[in-house]
Amino acid sequence: MDLVLNVADHYVLTPYVYPASWPEDGTLRQIISLLVLTNLGAAILYLGLGAISYFLVFDHKLMKHPHFLENQVQREIKYAMTSLPWISLPTVALFFAEVRGYSKLYDAVDESPLGWPGLFLSMISFLFFTDMCIYWIHRFLHHKLIYKFFHKPHHIWKIPTPFASHAFHPVDGFLQGLPYHIYPFFFPLHKVLYLGLYVFVNIWTISIHDGDYRVPSSLISVINGSAHHTDHHLFFDYNYGQYFTLWDRLGGSYRHPSALMGKGPHNLIRKLQAEGKLGDNGGKTKGSVMLKEE
Ligand SMILES: [Zn+2]
Ligand SMILES: [Zn+2]
């Protein structure tokens, strides 16, 4: 984060925003700057990448699904944009610790314990570490004693759009993002690689909500894609993972995606259309039956 902070200080904040008397390394100044940059960055990533995915990838036919809510896209965006500032508060505390040098982030490849191969290894370990942590945090959030307090809002969207990707209760959003932020306090990581991974995890989170259920056949059993995560939204106790199916398999919660077995949301929409239970404009016809996911 200090890379972003330094660039913002150099080009914008020092010449145009803060009084010259306020040193760049002032505690309050750094915290204010981090809060603004974190909120701006999160909003740009979420809205920008979400919009690209919504217009170019998301299959709009899914909006005809009986479980797709009225004004769902607006509601997802509103919920996410209300939560992000709250999520940013504890996140900025961790970014501040990072900027103050308490993490194991480093600037140059020379500082990597293993050189270039070290960067590659840290990329792999970042993905496996965060995938494992998110799996268990996500399962913990599904525990019946706490589910309704924090994680339930993310399950309102049974047929999610890319904008559901960040639509979490603030506690839920922070806890599921925590593995990304604590990784560099435990393991060495190049700063530029960290920024790249940060963008990547945002893209991935959007991609598992984008309604594009295709997965290369050789990877179906390994990668937790949109088809897998849609089954999590529909059937609840399965596919808690983020990138891989590894922990769902180890934890006994793996479910082969129904969309890949001809029993997914598209199949249901086609069936209902054939039965005349969906209006021409995609709206549900009056008196449509309660629908069981198959
Ligand atoms: Zn869940
Ligand atoms: Zn989700």
Image (cartoon, rainbow, N blue to C red):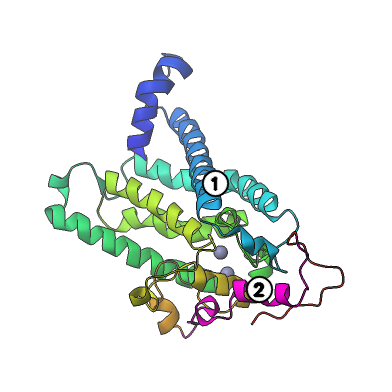
- Is the residue indicated by label 2 positioned so its CB lies within 8 Å of ligand 2? no
How far apart, in angstroms, are the residues tagged by discs 2 and 1? 26 Å
Query: Observer-nearest residue: 200 or 140?
Result: 200
x, y percent for residue 36: 51, 34
Q: Would residue 167 appear left or right of 11 to someone viewing this image? A: right
Q: Position of residue 235 (x, y in %)?
A: 61, 78
Q: Residue at x 54, y 63 (%)?
A: 211
Left or right for 159, reference 133: right
Image point 38% across, 77% down: which residue? Answer: 246
Left or right: 210 in relation to 64: left
Determine if the magenta segment contains residue 261. yes
Name the amino acid type tagged 1: Ala
> In which quadrant is the C terminus drawn?
bottom right
Q: Quadrant of residue 158?
A: bottom right
Q: Amino acid at mark 2?
A: Arg
Residue 199 or 70: which is nearer the viewer? 70
Disc 2 secondary structure class: helix
Q: Earlier in the sequence, mark 2 or mark 1?
A: 1
Using the rendered image of the protein, determine whether residue 66 is visible from the camera's viewpoint.
yes
Q: Quadrant of residue 120?
A: bottom left
Above-or-below relation of 261 to 71: below
Q: Which quarter shows the N terminus? A: top left
Residue at x-position 33% and y-position 76%: 218
Would you place residue 267 above or below residue 52 in this image? below
User: On the image, numbered disc 2 is attached to which residue?
Assistant: 270
Image side of residue 265 versus residue 105, left or right: right
Q: Which residues are magenta?
A: 252-280
Q: Which residue is mark 1?
A: 51
